[in-house]
Image (cartoon, rainbow, N blue to C red):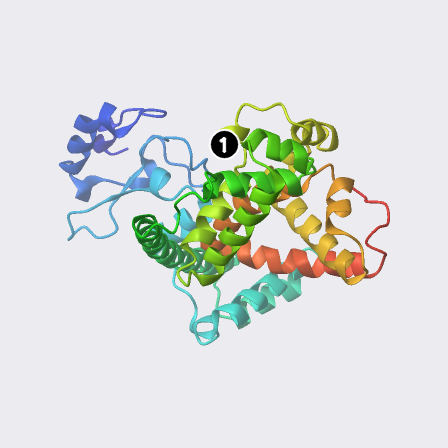
Amino acid sequence: MSTVNELYQNVTGKNKDEYRDYLMVLDRMDWHDYDYTTWPCADLSFQDLDADENHDIWPYKPNLGEPHWVDLNNQFPVGIRRYGYVHKLEMPEQVRELSHDDATSILNEIKDIKDDNLEEFNDQIQEYGFSNEQHFLWGIALLDDAQEKAYDAADDFLKEQKAKLDAQMDSHIEAAEAGGLLDPISGIDMETWAAANAKIAGGMDLEEVLQIIGTEKPIWDQVSAEWNTRMSQDTTFAISKVYGDAFVNSNIGKFASQETNQGSQANTTSSGNSLTNVMEDFELYIKIMCHQNMGAAQGKDAASILQEYGLTVTDWSSVGAHWSPKMATDTRMALKMGELMEKYNAEFAGAKAGDDIDF
């Protein structure tokens, strides 16, 4: 065993700040006398490691003529990627000639053959230029990595565009405020009007809403007409944005401390955890959305469908505000949404939308 191995220190579970001196020692060690396969923590079975944990350092220098080296364990937690790196594997030309989608589809089809026909599996991987099963599995992992990087790049672009649009909307709102477009009408500001409409949509009686606001119906009707006019004439949609934010988060201003009928109803119909469940379960969100869409086509009221899930209209507004920004910046979620919509649209199209729900 190389004397270089005497430099080894077990730093499992520690962060870099705790063993920075050790890293400097490894930087200066005699790499010509180093064999990564005999390093004390070397694991040539190349098991997968937990990417969220700090593992022991397994040094590897891919090129002795270059200064940099890598930590196989912490930089390559996926075992097959670690294996491919140290063996300097390359994607066969037969696969490189294919599109990413075609290559992924073909290799996964070959992978599924193994359990039923090992001989055919080996013939197939050789036909596509792989030297052995490990090389083949590394190829699949590489394609998966490329897809993940593409998704990440798309997500970064979407987030950048969203940030620009958000900044633009903020400037529109500032301009609307400066121009008086958000000034209160008969003492009722936009946030109060939006919150009041949310309470009404959620089932609160209009008279109770007017009492909380401190106004009468003729004034309310006049205020509503004026706010609707302002929104319709606002080509920047700044007023609509302020309205939407207040509608979704309606427990504000005069409604913040009120024990309302709507609040009581929400406690009853939401069955405590219904709102939390749909906030945490993207598939359930899409299922309810499809249920409403199919129900509307069958003449069923959307609010009554929400009640079947223990939700109110106000709850649903909050749910939409929760998931919409995520879908706008997450390519994977957008793709999953398409798959789920196809699934649940077919389910609710095949049965009446008002049929009993199978949770």
Question: Seen from this angle, which residue lies furthest front?
Answer: 218
Instruction: Name the image quarter holding residue 349.
Output: bottom right
Camera-side residue of 96 and 323:
323
Residue type indicated by callout 1: Ile
Task: Indicate whether 31 appears above or below 268.
Answer: below
Q: Residue at x 47, y 61 (%)?
A: 143
Task: Indicate whether 191 appears above or below 9.
Answer: below
144 on left or right of 163: right
Q: Residue at x 64, y 27 (%)?
A: 260
Could you classify mark 1 by the number of other residues whose Cα lies within 10 Å: few (under 14), some (14-19), or many (20 or more)?
Answer: some
Camera-side residue of 104 and 305:
305
Residue with the mark numbered 1: 252
Counting labels gives: 1
Image quadrant for the N terminus? top left
Q: Residue at x 40, y 57 (%)?
A: 158
Question: Seen from this angle, which residue lies furthest bottom?
Answer: 97
Instruction: Name the image quarter holding residue 311.
Output: top right
Q: Position of residue 299 (x, y in %)?
A: 81, 59
289 on left or right of 178: right
The answer to whether residue 117 shows anywhere in this view is no
Q: Position of residue 263 (x, y in %)?
A: 65, 29
Camera-side residue of 46 and 21:
21
Q: Secondary structure at mark 1?
A: loop
17 on left or right of 258: left
Q: Residue at x 15, y 39 (%)?
A: 30
The answer to whether residue 130 shows anywhere in this view is yes
Q: Position of residue 352 (x, y in %)?
A: 85, 56
Q: Position of residue 250 (x, y in %)?
A: 54, 36
Instruction: Name the image quarter holding residue 16.
Output: top left
Image quadrant for the C terminus? top right
